[in-house]
């Protein structure tokens, strides 16, 4: 059974490693990135199962709205 993961910081480091592992296992991944470039690079890993959402975690006021937007999008995108 496929699962959906929300992973912060999928442009590099541990976040990217977790996202790659989940994608390789056949799961879907919604990942946060800071730039459009990183979003495009992440989504290119798997056009059907990787979705990027722009978020700078230092902007605390954007965290909740971005997570809510990701949840809403995932219902449609990954349904």
Image (tube, grey):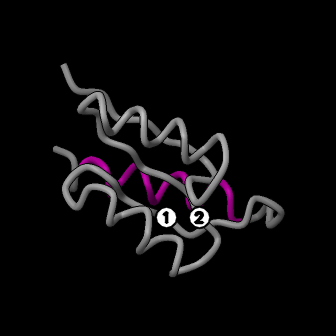
* C-alpha distance separating marks 2 and 1: 6 Å
Element class at badge 1: strand
Q: Is 9 situated left or right of 59 in this image?
A: left
Q: Nearer the viewer, mark 2 or mark 1?
A: 2
> For residue 53, which numbered disc appears in the image?
1
Q: Quadrant of the C terminus?
A: top left
| Residue shown at 47% from the left, 71% from the top | 39
| Residue shown at 36% from the left, 54% from the top | 72
Residue 63: within the magenta?
yes
- Residue bearing the label numbered 2: 33
Near mark 2 (Cα within 10 A), the count class, few <14, some 14-19 or many ≥20, is many
| Residue shown at 52% from the left, 35% from the top | 18
Is mark 2 in CB contact (under 8 Å) with mark 1?
Answer: yes
Residue 73: within the magenta?
yes
The span picked out in magenta is 62-76
| Residue shown at 55% from the left, 47% from the top | 16
Seen from this angle, which residue lies furthest top?
1
Residue 12 locus on image (x, y percent): 63, 55
Whether residue 76 is situated above or below residue 28 in the rendered picture: below
């Amino acid at each position: 059974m496929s699962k959906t993961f929300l992973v912060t910081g999928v442009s590099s480091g541990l976040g990217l490693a977790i996202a790659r592992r989940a994608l390789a296992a056949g799961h879907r991944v919604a990942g946060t990135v800071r730039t459009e470039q990183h979003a495009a690079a992440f989504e290119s890993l798997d056009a059907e199962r990787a979705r990027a959402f722009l978020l700078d975690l230092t902007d605390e006021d954007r965290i909740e709205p971005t997570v809510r937007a990701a949840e809403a999008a995932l219902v449609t995108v990954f349904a």
